[in-house]
């Protein structure tokens, strides 16, 4: 049987076999010799029995990866043969991430105290308690290793990952985090690391390949040819095992897409496209079945062995996943209860007095024991103290090898191995300068963003338009709403006459038309709210500038606004019988466009302030109602109380409303009320025309000039004066409306700048 197994393994390791399956090998294996990595990394040692080896042979026939077979074969030959395979040479410049005494606490409101003078309180009746989330956590993670942080819910797993990923404010986090003995600056931390959130935040209508390609265009420099970016994406698709799903859309609740495991691997892929040195993940296996979870962790193992440090929180790993992990860190209510190798876990608990049964999952046993201790009166204090003593004893017995590699040299070595190319400002030239003895500031070696400003705008705009084009129903519904509203107004106010009643109807039409343009802009609220967390994830590690995002979305919103404005203007202007001809129509169109622009900008700004769709709609509807109230339609400016006059000038509806009124009534030669018509809005309107003419003659004698039935008594200028529209020209109203739009876009930028720090306090 042994000979049969060995011959089968030799057949698989033959050059012809490897040549046929070279594409299936993970990137961390060479094509020349078994056991050597492309990054010159140590192959993890796997302890297997003959039975397990036979099972692996059977698994291979069912499609298991050849990398696992090579690791098994290497160990098998070393155990049964006196002539072991050559050991792989270690990385010449390894990275070591160390953290010591990390402590983080938050203040929480316990309950309302009616007597602020009594008990611990902040002075206003609310009792404040301090909760310790991290309490002196220490550890170390090396390049090529995967560290898993385990613990029950509320143990501090995610908090520790956030602390290591620089997602907690420096003033709140105590302790030291170093890379190769040097403190990591925030700017450098963003360049060399990546963070994968627990939730899969992806654009639903993009395919897997498009999602990764857009990430490559963000993270990889524009100096890199597009073919190389595409080659990187294709290699990553194979590495992630997503070849069969490459052309499938991500999907969401309303659109069928990739599976949960594939979605999670895409989330990992977009953050490792630039090959970071450190990769942080918050529960990457959460919500996945056992097989999908194993595939995800297997992918992470390949990422680690390609020259990265992988640190992740995980809730309860399976037996197979545990075999892939290099280090474990168990937490209980912010305290470390175990840190070390998975192979040392049975010995640790055996010395503590709790032997792990042979057939039981080691991590499940440990987590169950920790929960039992947490429910006991003493808690996990004894286990925490025992771990400190055990680690101290292990440290004394351990001989640590000092690499003596500075962070600068380690990063240079990574760049020379084509790692971190996206962040290198000067490329090989700066490396040659350093090798010749020149000193260069490490921070100046890296650019904050991989691409220039205009490139980011193009990529963001392209992605947004592609995602929107695949959801045409969103714009179609908005266009339909504008078209239906315009049709209703056109038929309700069809061919208004130049009479006193026609004046009132025109005023009502303009007020409703201007307010409608703003209300139809409310659909922009969910647009950013749906992208908010994608935006925060991408900008947290400098995928692009916030200003690029604002400008890109500003530019791509304009074509839709032009179409909506032209549709509404064409539907209503000629049907209602508005004045001005072609010039009047052009100004009416520009005013509608400016109103759409200002309304869209205002709603976009509010979406950056509020974080919930329903709250956003409520705020928008309320504020727009106030704008209409103070616009001057319901009450003229000179009749508004002084203490509310400021709101009149802040009203977005005021300026387009006054602009279109001036466009309609600016012709002083056009008469709207003639002599006999002045009685129409009074009780005398019902008397015969002969009586009205007689009254006009009597009035003429009193006034001193002749007033006939055709004498013009009210022109358009008189109507504007009566409405209190005497301060600005119609073009000034137009420019002010446009300026409001730009102001709200600038305010939106500042809300993103201030409100998207994505750091705990």
Image (cartoon, rainbow, N blue to C red):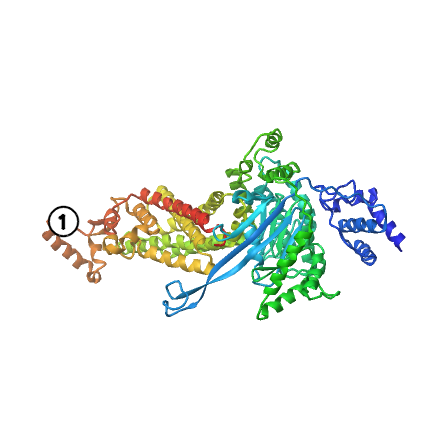
Q: Provide residue 112's location: percent of width, then percent of height.
A: 41, 68
Q: Provide residue 31's location: percent of width, then percent of height.
A: 77, 41
Q: Nearer the viewer, residue 130 or 612?
A: 130
Q: Residues within 10 Å of mark 1 (few under 14, many from 20)?
A: few
Number of marks in the image? 1
Q: Provide residue 363's location: percent of width, then percent of height.
A: 67, 62
Q: Please tell me which residue is depicted at 58% across the width and 60% down the height of the picture.
A: 335
Residue 683 shown left or right of residue 663 in the figure = left
Q: Nearer the viewer, residue 314 or 264?
A: 314
Q: Quadrant of the N terminus?
A: bottom right
Q: Nearer the viewer, residue 668 or 590?
A: 590
Residue 735 shown left or right of residue 527 in the figure = left
Residue that badge 1 annotates:
706
Q: Provide residue 153's location: percent of width, then percent of height.
A: 58, 63
Residue 247 shown left or right of residue 490 in the figure = right
Task: Inspect this view and state whether residue 214 appears.
Answer: no
Element type at marker 1? loop
Task: Inspect this view and state whether residue 215 appears.
Answer: yes
């Amino acid at each position: 049987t042994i000979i049969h197994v060995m011959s089968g393994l030799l057949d698989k390791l033959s050059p012809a076999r490897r040549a046929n399956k070279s594409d299936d090998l993970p990137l961390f294996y060479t094509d020349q010799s078994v056991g050597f990595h492309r990054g010159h990394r140590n192959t993890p040692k796997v302890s297997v029995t003959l039975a397990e080896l036979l099972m692996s042979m059977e698994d291979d026939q069912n499609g298991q990866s050849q990398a696992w077979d090579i690791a098994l074969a290497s160990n098998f030959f070393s155990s049964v043969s006196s002539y072991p395979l050559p050991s792989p040479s270690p990385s010449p410049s390894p990275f070591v991430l160390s953290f010591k005494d990390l402590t983080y606490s938050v203040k929480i409101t316990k309950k309302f105290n009616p007597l602020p003078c009594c008990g611990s309180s902040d002075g206003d009746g609310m009792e404040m308690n301090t909760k310790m989330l991290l309490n002196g956590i220490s550890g170390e993670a090396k390049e090529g290793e995967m560290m898993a942080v385990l613990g029950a819910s509320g143990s501090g797993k995610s908090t520790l990952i956030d602390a290591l990923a620089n997602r907690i404010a420096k003033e709140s986090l105590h302790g030291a985090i170093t890379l190769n003995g040097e403190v990591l600056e925030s700017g450098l931390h963003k360049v060399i690391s990546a963070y994968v959130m627990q939730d899969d935040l992806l654009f639903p209508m993009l395919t897997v390949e498009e999602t990764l390609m857009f990430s490559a265009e963000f993270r990889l420099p524009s100096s890199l040819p597009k073919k190389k970016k595409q080659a990187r994406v294709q290699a990553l698709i194979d590495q992630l095992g997503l070849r069969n799903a490459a052309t499938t859309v991500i999907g969401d609740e309303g659109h069928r897409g990739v599976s949960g495991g594939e979605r999670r691997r895409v989330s990992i892929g977009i953050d490792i496209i630039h090959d970071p040195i450190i990769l942080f993940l918050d529960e990457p296996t959460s919500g996945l079945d056992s097989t999908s979870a194993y595939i995800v962790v297997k992918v992470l193992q390949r990422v680690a062995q390609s020259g990265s440090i992988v640190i992740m929180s995980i809730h309860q790993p399976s037996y197979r996943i545990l075999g892939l992990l290099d280090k474990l860190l168990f937490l209980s209510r912010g305290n470390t209860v175990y840190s070390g190798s998975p192979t040392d876990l049975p010995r640790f608990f055996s010395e503590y007095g709790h032997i792990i049964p042979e057939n039981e999952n080691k991590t499940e046993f440990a987590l169950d024991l920790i929960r039992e201790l947490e429910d006991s009166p003493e808690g996990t204090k004894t286990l925490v103290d025992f771990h400190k003593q055990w680690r101290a004893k292990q440290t004394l017995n351990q001989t640590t090898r000092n690499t003596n590699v500075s962070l600068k040299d380690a990063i240079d070595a990574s760049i020379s191995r084509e790692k971190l190319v996206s962040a290198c400002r000067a490329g090989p030239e700066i490396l040659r300068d350093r090798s010749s003895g020149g000193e260069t500031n490490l921070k100046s070696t890296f650019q904050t963003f991989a691409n220039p400003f205009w490139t980011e705008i193009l990529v963001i705009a392209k992605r947004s338009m592609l995602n929107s084009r695949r959801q045409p129903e969103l714009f179609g519904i908005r266009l339909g709403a504008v078209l239906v509203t315009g049709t209703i107004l056109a038929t309700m106010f069809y061919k208004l006459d130049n009479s006193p009643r026609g004046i009132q109807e025109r005023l009502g039409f303009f007020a409703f038309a201007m307010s409608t343009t703003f209300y139809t802009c409310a659909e922009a609220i969910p647009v950013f709210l749906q992208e908010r967390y994608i935006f925060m994830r991408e900008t947290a590690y400098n995928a692009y500038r916030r200003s690029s995002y604002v400008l890109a979305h500003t530019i791509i919103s304009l074509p839709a606004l032009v179409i909506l404005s032209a549709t509404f203007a064409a539907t209503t202007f000629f049907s209602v019988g508005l004045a001005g001809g072609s010039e009047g129509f052009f100004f009416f169109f520009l005013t509608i466009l400016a109103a759409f622009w200002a309304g869209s900008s205002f709603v976009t700004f509010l979406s950056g302030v509020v974080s919930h769709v329903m709250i956003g709609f409520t705020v928008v509807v309320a504020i727009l109602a106030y704008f209409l109230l103070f616009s001057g339609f319901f009450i003229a400016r000179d009749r508004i109380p002084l203490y509310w006059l400021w709101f009149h000038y802040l009203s977005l509806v005021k300026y387009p409303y006054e602009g279109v009124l001036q466009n309609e009534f600016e012709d002083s030669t056009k008469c709207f009320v003639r002599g006999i018509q002045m009685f129409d809005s009074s009780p005398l309107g019902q008397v015969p025309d002969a009586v009205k003419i007689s009254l006009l003659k009597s009035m003429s004698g009193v006034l001193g000039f002749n007033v006939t039935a055709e004498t013009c008594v009210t022109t358009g200028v008189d109507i504007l004066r009566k409405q209190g529209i005497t301060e600005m020209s119609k073009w000034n109203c137009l420019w002010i409306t446009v300026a409001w739009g730009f102001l709200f876009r600038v305010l939106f930028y500042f809300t993103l700048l201030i409100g998207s720090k994505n750091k705990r306090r």
